[in-house]
Image: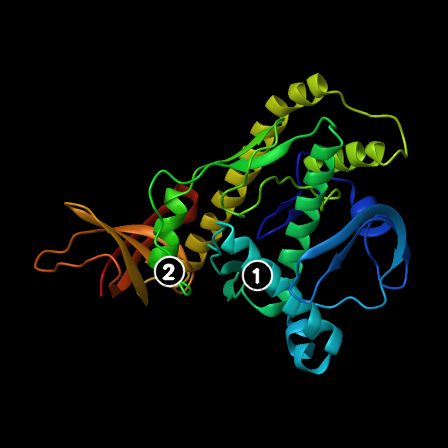
């Protein structure tokens, strides 16, 4: 597969699970081959030196995001790591990047088919540590491939066509509006800036177990380090792009549709209930809304005698919900 797929009801791994869950997984107490990015940062998170090397690592303890957030104030190493990664993010944003992270919607389905929805904050210290470390590794990997003049596939993003609303603490409406104005992220063989990340060059090679592109680029990188002959020429990578891009688009579309299916399924179990909704757009005969409890978009016919404006929060009622038909009808409560 071109990528692993994480759906509410199941997971479709890119590689057979005997590899992704065992041989290649960072299991606690088990030595594992890795590709290590060793970066020397100053107190102000400036990159002073860095190197990439194959390594053998052993995880002493696996921690969840919540466990790291809980331990943060008690663990000096975690506290320092968070301070540095926060400064790394500030540097990126100062170079033109922008943070437009929505909370993550988690759908849980039990054995009886009952659906539960949780909203997870993805802006906690633990998420920031993982995110910035990953972005740093991907950036340095792209920089290495560029400077070594190795054939590669890069991720780039042009500046948005419309100016974005800048805010230190954007609300949901601003996040939604800004994300719609962004230019598409492109996969291409020439290194170009990634506007959204605020980086001069970028790719992804930090997840070779769950993204085929990352696996290809780690092979190229290891060849550049002198560990084996170059596996892909530029023409060969260019031939792979028309195969890889549609596969990634189909996977992203399937993930979006399945999440929407299960959210509507959840609402079908709560017909007649009332939910807060954020007005996103006003049209002549309808409104586009965001159900803020589960971050699901829908539309509502404009009720006579009422006028709402983007940014207002209203109370709506679930009238009909059919996940098989992607049908959701709501009305003003």
Q: Quadrant of residue 225?
A: top right
Front-most of residues 17 and 213: 213
Q: Residue at x 73, y 78 (%)?
A: 76
Q: Are marks 2 and 1 in contact (CB under 8 Å)?
A: no
Mark whose residue sits in front, 2 or 1: 2
Residue 264: image location, x then y, percent = 41, 53
Residue furthest to the left in view is: 305
Q: Which residue is mark 2?
A: 172
Look at the picture and state if 50 lies above or below 185: below
**Residue 87 in view here:** yes
Quarter of the image where one finds residue 127: bottom right
Is 265 located above or below residue 255 in the figure?
below
In the displayed orientation, state which residue is furthest to the bottom.
74
- The C terminus sits in image quarter: bottom left
Residue placed under numbered mark 1 in the picture: 112
Q: Which quadrant of the structure image shows residue 244? A: top right
Query: SS for tag 1?
Result: loop
How many neighbours does mark 2 have within 10 angstroms: few (below 14), some (14-19), or many (20 or more)?
some
Q: Is residue 186 left or right of residue 260?
A: right
Q: Quadrant of the N terminus?
A: top right
Asked whether the viewer can see residue 12, the reply is: no
Query: Vertically, is 161 above or below 178?
Result: above
């Amino acid at each position: 597969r071109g990528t692993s797929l994480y759906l509410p009801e199941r997971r479709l791994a890119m590689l057979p699970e005997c590899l992704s869950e065992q041989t290649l997984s960072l299991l606690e107490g088990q030595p594992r081959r890795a590709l290590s990015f060793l970066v020397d940062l100053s107190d102000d998170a400036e990159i002073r030196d860095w190197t990439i090397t194959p390594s053998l690592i052993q995880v002493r303890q696996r921690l969840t995001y919540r466990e790291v957030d809980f331990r943060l104030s008690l663990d000096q190493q975690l506290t320092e790591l968070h301070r540095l990664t926060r400064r790394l993010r500030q540097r990126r944003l100062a170079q033109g990047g922008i943070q437009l992270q929505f909370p993550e919607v988690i759908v849980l389905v039990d054995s009886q088919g009952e659906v539960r929805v949780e909203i997870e904050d993805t802006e906690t210290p633990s998420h920031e540590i993982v995110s910035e470390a990953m972005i740093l590794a991907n950036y340095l990997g792209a920089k290495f491939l560029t400077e070594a003049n190795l054939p590669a596939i890069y991720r780039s993003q042009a500046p948005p066509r419309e100016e974005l609303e800048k805010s230190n603490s954007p609300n949901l409406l601003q996040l939604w509006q800004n994300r719609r104005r962004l230019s598409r992220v492109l996969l291409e063989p020439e290194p170009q800036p990634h506007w959204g990340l605020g980086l001069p060059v970028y790719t992804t090679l930090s997840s070779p177990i769950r993204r085929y592109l990352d696996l290809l680029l780690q092979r190229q990188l290891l060849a550049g380090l002198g560990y084996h002959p170059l596996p892909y020429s530029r023409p060969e990578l260019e031939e792979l792009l028309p195969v890889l891009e549609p596969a990634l688009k189909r996977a992203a579309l399937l993930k979006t549709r399945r999440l929407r299916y299960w959210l509507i399924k959840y609402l079908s179990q709560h017909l007649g209930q009332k939910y807060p909704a954020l007005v996103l757009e006003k049209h002549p005969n309808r409104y586009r809304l965001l159900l803020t409890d589960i971050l699901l978009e829908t539309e509502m016919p404009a009720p006579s005698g009422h006028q709402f404006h983007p940014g207002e929060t209203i109370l709506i009622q679930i009238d009909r919900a059919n996940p098989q038909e992607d049908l959701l009808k709501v009305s003003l409560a």
